Image: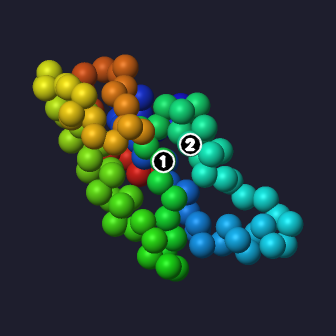
Amino acid sequence: MLGPANVPKVLVGLKSDLRDDFEKRGQTCVSNAEGKRMKDEYNFSAYIECSAKTRENLTTVFFRAVQVHETMKKIREGQHSDDVLGKDDIKPLNRPSRCDKCTIF
């Protein structure tokens, strides 16, 4: 387990702009599918890839972290419904009811 058990976490794949360069040189990197598998394996709430160089998905990372936090807050408050979850890769956690923080890795 990474981080406190009662805090929803977002797994972020960095430097996604380098994927093509690595593949051209025959080097391996974490694929999108592997990132999603790791999200499920380590019980992260979401997985997003981003690049600071190209600015791809930078704001999405922070918006998704806030969305995960707000979703967990609504679930704790008993307002859970299918509509609250929004994105299909955000899942409720079977964790203690107290989680006031959101961790970004």
Total numbered circles = 2
Secondary element at tag 1? strand
Checking the image for residue 47, the label placed there is: 1
Question: Which residue type does callout 2 highlight?
Answer: Lys
Residue sitting at the far right: 26
Task: Using the numbered discs, state the Cα–Cα distance from disc 1 to disc 2 in whole angstroms.
Answer: 6 Å
Foreground: 103 or 59? 59
Q: Earlier in the sequence, mark 1 or mark 2?
A: 2
Locate residue 27, reporting x and y percent: 82, 64
Q: Which residue is at 42% across, 39% downward?
A: 89
> Is any part of residue 49 visible from this angle?
yes
Q: Which residue is mark 2?
A: 36
Q: Which residue is at 47% across, 54% downward?
A: 48
Q: Is residue 8 left or right of residue 22?
A: left
In the rendered view, would you say 68 is above or below 78?
below
Checking the image for residue 87, the label placed there is: none
| Disc 1 + disc 2, Cβ < 8 Å | yes
Locate residue 35, reporting x and y percent: 60, 47
